[in-house]
Image (spheres, rainbow, N blue to C red):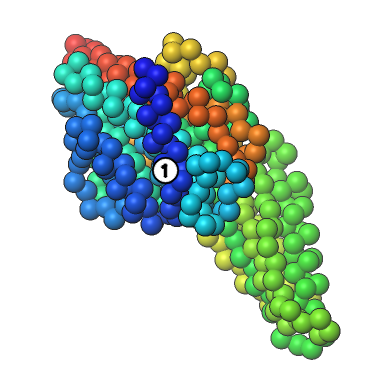
Amino acid sequence: MTHTSEQQLIDWRRELHSWPELSGYEVETTARLRRWLQDAGLRLLDYPLETGLVVEVGQGETLIALRADIDALPIHEATGLPYRSRNAGVMHACGHDVHSAVMLGAALQLHALGDQLPGRIRILFQPAEENATGARKFIHAGVLQDVQAVFGMHNEPGLPTGAFATRGGAFYANADKFVVRVASPEQGVDAILVASQIIQALQSLTSRSFNTLDSLVLSVTRIDAGQSGNTLPREAEFGGTVRTHDKQVRAQLEQRARQIVEQIAVANGATATFSWHPGPPVLENDARWAQFASEIAQQVGYRVQTAELHLGGEDFAYYLQQIPGAFVSIGSASEFGLHHGGFNPDEALIAPAAHYFTQLAQQALQHLNARCRDAVLS
């Protein structure tokens, strides 16, 4: 990639960064992406989408997909950058602007190859990853029809620029939420005391009731018992998040948490309700495609390693429930982590990552074509 085109990707990323939009409201983001892609001559596909868009390059029956997410977070930016967010209280604090720039670059490079491509590549610019609704909307709209493999990325601030990591099987976590409401029907029952007992029991649940080798985290992240300073509250509510990497552990943890809430409430003469709100499921990479993705990364010069289990949620998991593929981490070397107001990924990752996905797409198509020929010959 030339210096000029590399700078173009950085410029596009910075424009997206300056005008971030929340999940489901990416109207101007979509318009910018559409304009840049149409100006480059790419073919947009017509799906019933309110935000986000899909383009396709190449010809033939063999078809893979690449995905970028495009939404931002309700976070106040604290980077002080000249291209910082101009939308107050909204920030690309997860790097979806970077992901979009990477896939813009891959789309342009693949489009330039034209008839040389051994099949088709569908590039998804997906909205609403942060609230885990975008992937399901895209799937419902039909964007995965005829797709044989799907690939995506997330920048990883804990990895240096030039580093690459992925793994076969479970990678990102089941990311669920829960809410507990405690009520004291009788005078003298302190809802805060009951809630605190439940919280302590829930916090020790992961270490006392499950195998220490299981990967799971339960965190209480908020509590509300009103504003009174001199009376016992009759109600208290708290909530939090649960991260697991195993379907059975996920189900068992929900069941045990529900039992603890109900039993402690009864023992204290209170009542309690426990509601569970499922988030994205565990992201499970196809082992062969994860290995394939790592091999291509090594070919193009990345320092490749096996990724650790990730406790974040990622709605790319919904695509992998439908078709095989792989999700990968690419180092972004930010001093501050994801979802932080100071998050500032190294833009030097953009051009190499665009080149990587260009190579991955071409070789994945070749691999699928060869597999098809082998199946016919056998």
Q: The residue under label 1 is which amino acid type?
A: Leu
Closer to the camera in the image, 171 or 157: 157
The N terminus sits in image quarter: top left
- Vertical order, 81 against 188 (above or below): above
Q: Is residue 18 left or right of residue 365?
A: right
> In x, y percent, where is residue 293?
43, 21
Q: Position of residue 168 (x, y in %)?
A: 50, 27
Q: Position of residue 361 (x, y in %)?
A: 32, 23
Q: Nearer the viewer, residue 232 or 341?
A: 341
Residue at 30 percent across and 19 percent down: it is 362
Q: Which sits in the foreground, 159 or 33? A: 33
Quarter residue 286 falls in: top left
Looking at the rendered structure, the number of numbered marks drawn on it comes to 1
Secondary structure, mark 1, is helix
Which residue is at a point 56% across and 41% down the rendered structure image?
81
Q: Using the rendered view, name the quadrant where residue 200 is placed.
A: bottom right
Tell me if I can see residue 324 in this picture.
no
Residue at image mark 1: 16
The reply, left or right, for residue 273 in relation to residue 359 is right
Residue 89, compared with residue 265, is above or below; it is: above
Q: Is residue 373 left or right of residue 273?
A: left
Q: Where does the C terminus fall, quadrant-wise?
A: top left
The residue positioned 52% from the left and 33% from the top of the image is 155
Quadrant of residue 213 within the rendered picture? top right
Q: Nearer the viewer, residue 166 or 69?
A: 69
Residue drawn 28% across the image and 27% down it:
108
